[in-house]
Amino acid sequence: MKLGVVIPAAGSGKRFGSTLPKQFQPLNGVPLLVHAIRVFEDSSFNCSVVLAVHPDYKMTVQNMVMRYNLTCVSALVDGGAERSESIDNALCDPSLRSCQLIAVHDAVRPFHTEELLERLVRTAEQFGAAVPCVPLSDTIKVVRNYTVVETVPRTDLRAIQTPQVFNAQLLRSCYESLGELDGSITDDASVLELCGKSVYTVDGLTENIKITTQQDFAFAQFLLHKEDY
Ligand code: CTP
Ligand code: MG
């Protein structure tokens, strides 16, 4: 089966705070972006991967694709000012035209697995949209002006990860009908939700963390070498 894959890799990593954007930081000597692509490269799906990158880093990424022999990468497109704009640009790429399903995966999540991808694909084939979720362990409160407003019951709350897998037509039509995109849309399931479409969940992986801060990166290094501790 041909699986379309969109990887947004055009962010500047403000919260990470390094000159080299976090998606290019080496983890165990290999850039985070390459870790993110490898699961698709090595999977049993025939993947066509479109990367959204900032024009300043196009050459860097082209070199990475060659150096690591990432044959599943079918195109590089320009990223936008927001993550959702980067996705919107990638969805228009002709190399995804024949894909019935599209997986969207953050460039800065190096610990997804083929087994998770398979479960998401099976669920998306059946229901149109599938996202991985994990339960929360902290108590969650709404806080305004340094004051607790309320405590939100935790039972129904989940943290949502990527990859997120969608019927391609459904995802494209939702992005099209939304029109204006902004920074408040931090994942692709949100785009479907805003259009009133159902999104199904599967159990995610607690180790499938998004590298947002330097502390996350240190934790990722720990996860890679935890058997040595
Ligand atoms: N991303 C993108 N285009 C943007 C912003 C983000 O392609 N305009 C990508 C990032 O490169 C990352 C993913 O979306 O792979 C998740 O975004 P996030 O973790 O927020 O990364 P940044 O936006 O780079 O970080 P920050 O919000 O701290 O600036
Ligand atoms: Mg961001």
Image: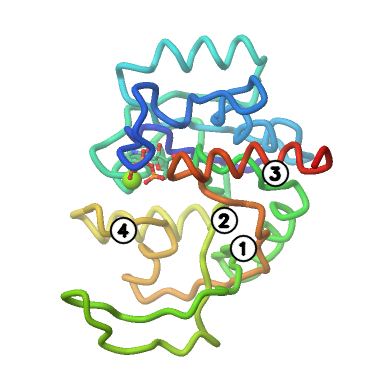
> Coloured how?
rainbow
User: Does residue 55 sit above or below 107 in this rendering?
Assistant: above
Disc 3, ligand 1: is the CB inside 8 Å? no
Q: Amino acid at mark 1?
A: Ala
Q: Which residue is mark 1?
A: 124
**Of the image marks 4 and 3, the number of the one nearer the N terminus:** 4
Please rate how many residues cluster around mark 4, counting C-alpha atoms within 10 Å: few if below 14, some from 14 to 19, many from 20.
some
Q: Position of residue 79 (x, y in %)?
A: 32, 32
Quadrant in the picture for the C terminus? top right
Q: Residue at x 29, y 54 (%)?
A: 176
Task: Report how far apart the C-alphas of labels 1 and 4 lie in the structure.
Answer: 21 Å
Q: Classify mark 4: helix, strand or loop.
A: loop
Q: Amino acid at mark 2?
A: Val
Q: State left or right for residue 229 relative to residue 75.
A: right
Disc 4, ligand 1: is the CB inside 8 Å? no
Quadrant for residue 87, please give it: top left
Quadrant in the picture for the N terminus? top right
Q: Which residue is mark 2?
A: 165
**Of the image marks 3 and 1, the number of the one nearer the N terminus:** 1
Task: Report how far apart the C-alphas of labels 2 and 3 lie in the structure.
Answer: 25 Å
User: Does residue 9 sit above or below 138 in this rendering?
Assistant: above
**Of the image marks 1 and 4, the number of the one nearer the N terminus:** 1
User: Does residue 69 sit above or below 181 in this rendering?
Assistant: above
Specify the quarter for ligand 1: top left
Q: Amino acid at mark 4?
A: Ile
Q: Residue at x 36, y 62 (%)?
A: 191
Residue 185 tag number: 4
Q: Position of residue 73 (x, y in %)?
A: 57, 25
Q: Classify mark 1: helix, strand or loop.
A: helix
Q: Which residue is mark 3?
A: 223
Q: State left or right for residue 153 relative to residue 32.
A: left
Total residue callouts: 4
